[in-house]
Amino acid sequence: MHTTEKIVIRSSSLPSYADCSRRTAGKLLAKELAALGITLRETSQGVGAALGSSTHQAAAYSLNSKINDGSLGNATQAMDLAFELYHEIQKTEGIVYDGATPTYDRAELQLKTLVNTYRSKVAPGITPVEVEVRLEADIGDGFVLSGQFDVREIESIRDLKTGAASRAHISQYGSYALLCRVHGRTVEQIVEDYLPRKKEPEPEYFYYDAEVAVNAARAILKRIKDDVAAFRESGEPTSFIANPQSMLCSDRFCPVWGTAFCREHKNKGEKE
């Protein structure tokens, strides 16, 4: 199958592609799959992702305020922005709760804690130059890379992660560095500011060499291009490796789960 429409690869999808290429490919190629008669499933957002996005809202407000006048802005306004986004996600997408956050009440408490901890322990140590800037670059062969970093300091990028457990996102960070360099911004180091999703989170900081991260990003971008070309040539879903052991291999989180595009998962339902 051939198309002239460019595919937009988001930086945040690179770690996901390494985890399960077929799940991520389903999102990248949604229009092409629809043309083939394959309809993707609608999925809800996990509570961890919802809390992360909502904490980012408060963080962005706080750091933009720091750029403007040196302060972190109004604490109440920062918290209100976080909850407004959380409720919007809950209303429009639905939220799947988990063992670390089993109820809305627990989510409310965790969101307050994450926002307050970020503003009191993480943000004071950041010297922001730019906040939440989206950059794009044509990377050839009909693909565009698009990424939005959390915050850039003079020669570094910082990215906020929250979650029940810390995971490596080096390819995502590498794509940010790649985009920054294309647009004339210097990036020598990448810092992940990690806040665990628990009662009393203590910030952890992970440091990545920009060159190593960029190489990791380039490797996955090349794989995406090669896999898409193979799929367009053969029409076979096996052009993309499926990972049934992925933590997100579930009818709750995967849009291709159980469709004609992927049946490699466990199935407790009826015999086929």
Image: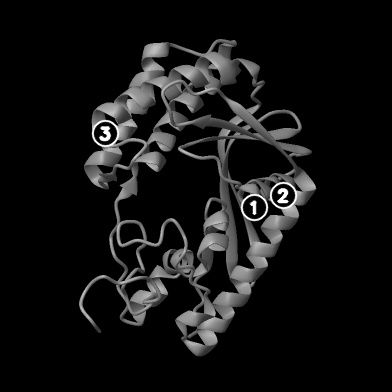
Q: Can residue 182 be seen in this view?
A: no
Residue positioned 53% across, 50% down in the render: 12
The answer to whether 121 is drawn above or below residue 206 in the figure is above
* Residue at image mark 1: 171
Which mark is drawn over residue 213?
2
Residue ID at (35%, 61%):
250
Residue 132 seen in the current view? yes
Q: Which residue lies furthest to the bottom in this view?
A: 234
Please, what secondary structure does the residue beneath circle 1 have?
A: helix
Q: Tag 3 or tag 2, which sits nearer the N-term? A: 3
Q: Residue at x 34, y 75 (%)?
A: 34
Figure quadrant of residue 40: bottom left
Q: In this view, does 170 lie above or below 32?
A: above
Q: Where is residue 238 in the image (x, y as percent from the top left)?
A: 49, 81
Q: Name the residue under label 3.
A: 87
* Residue at figure coordinates x 74%, y 28% from the top left: 154
Is the residue marked by circle 3 packed among few (<14), some (14-19), or many (20+) residues within 10 Å? some
Q: Which amino acid does label 1 sit on?
A: Ser
Percent x, y of residue 8 = 52, 61
Percent position of residue 263, x then y: 36, 77
Q: Nearer the viewer, residue 46 or 190?
A: 46
- The picture quadrant where one finds residue 151 is top right
- Left or right: 268 as drawn, with respect to 141: left
Q: Is residue 168 left or right of residue 108?
A: right
